[in-house]
């Protein structure tokens, strides 16, 4: 996965805002051990094209702004990383075991996994993102542009599946929370019957009522509907 970026001195701490948009600031993330471009390994010449939109990562002078007012413009630049031992501490084996063992309902499990910022806990999911950090790894909206995104989320899925296994009948299809994101208004609670709109890159709707829960084999069949296979 390549490694850290070159070290960039003179950087400030970043703030974990309560809703990702406005204050108060619940926690601070100290600068990591990199901050510059990735210069070794298979991704040393890798380019990221979207954003920046909402990066936690800071460098003197700032990141190159997106040329489009909607922040969706083509903005190629080399991959930056800023590996953080502070964030990595939130993803330790002990922290993973803790959320699997002691949070027995989906609402508390996912809240603790995401991060309880008001309690000073970064969470396994959030901590994994900021362990890599940088541009685009620390940007909520463009973090999939860093190749580390996929193995990190594969691990989060594994943690979720491990949590489900002791009580699949109850936990296998358990949901909690809204079907929107931060800032959305009048959003209903999510259900297993909600369809998922994938946007312009995937024209058909995914019918979630036909899909199995995490951990079962999935198949994209000929009519482009995501279905769960019996296991």
Image (cartoon, rainbow, N blue to C red):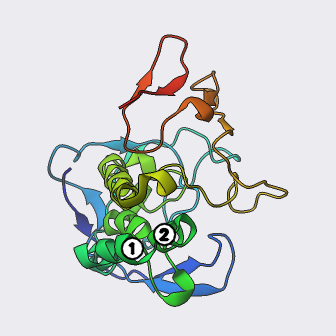
Q: Position of residue 145 (x, y in %)?
A: 41, 46
The residue at the point 65 percent across, 72 percent down is: 19
**Looking at the rendering, which quadrant does residue 231 occupy?**
top left
Of 23 and 228, nearer the camera is: 228
Residue most toward the left? 41
Question: For mark 1, what is the residue?
Answer: 99
With respect to residue 79, does 200 lie above or below?
above
Mark 1 secondary-structure assignment? helix
Q: Is residue 103 above or below residue 188?
A: below
Q: Is residue 190 left or right of residue 153?
A: right
In this picture, residue 175 sits left or right of residue 178: left
Provide residue 185's location: percent of width, then percent of height: 83, 58
Q: Is residue 76 left or right of residue 174?
A: left
Toward the top, the furthest residue is: 222
Judge whether residue 198 can be spotted in this image.
Answer: no
Give neighbour class at mark 2: few <14, some 14-19, many 20+ (Cα, 10 Å).
some
Q: Residue at 40% of width from left, 78% of height from top? A: 102
**Which residue appears at 42% of the width and 74% of the height?**
123
Crowdedness of circle 1 by 10 Å Cα count: few (<14), some, many (20+)? many
Q: Is residue 181 visible?
A: yes
Which residue corresponds to the image point at 31% horizontal and 51% vertical from the top-left? Answer: 148
- Of mark 1 and mark 2, the one earlier in the sequence is 1
Between 185 and 45, which is closer to the camera in this rendering? 185
Q: Nearer the viewer, residue 198 or 195?
A: 195
SS for dot 2: helix
- Contact, CB < 8 Å: mark 1 with mark 2? yes
As drawn, the label of residue 109 is: 2
The percent coordinates of residue 83 (x first, y second) are: 28, 69
Disc 1 from disc 2: Cα separation: 6 Å
């Amino acid at each position: 996965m390549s490694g850290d970026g070159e070290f960039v001195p003179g950087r400030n701490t970043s703030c974990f805002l309560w809703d990702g948009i406005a204050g108060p600031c619940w926690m601070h993330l100290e600068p990591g051990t990199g901050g510059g471009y990735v210069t070794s390994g298979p991704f040393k010449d890798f380019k990221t094209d979207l954003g920046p939109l909402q990066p936690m990562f800071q460098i003197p002078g700032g990141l190159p702004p997106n040329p489009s007012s909607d922040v969706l413009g083509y903005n190629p630049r080399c991959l930056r990383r800023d590996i953080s031992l502070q964030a990595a501490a939130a993803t330790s084996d002990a922290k993973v075991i803790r959320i699997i063992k002691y949070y027995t309902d989906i609402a508390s499990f996912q809240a603790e996994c995401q991060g309880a910022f008001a309690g000073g806990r970064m969470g396994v999911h959030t901590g994994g993102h900021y362990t890599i950090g940088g541009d685009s790894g620390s940007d909520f909206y463009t973090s999939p542009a860093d190749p580390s995104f996929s193995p990190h989320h594969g691990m989060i899925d594994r943690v979720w599946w491990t949590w489900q296994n002791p009580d699949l009948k109850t936990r296998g299809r358990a949901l909690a929370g809204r079907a929107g994101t931060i800032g959305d208004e009048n959003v209903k609670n999510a259900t297993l019957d909600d369809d998922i709109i994938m946007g312009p890159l995937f024209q058909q709707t995914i019918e979630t009522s036909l899909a199995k829960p995490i951990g079962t084999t999935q198949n994209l069949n000929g009519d482009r509907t995501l279905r769960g296979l019996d296991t």
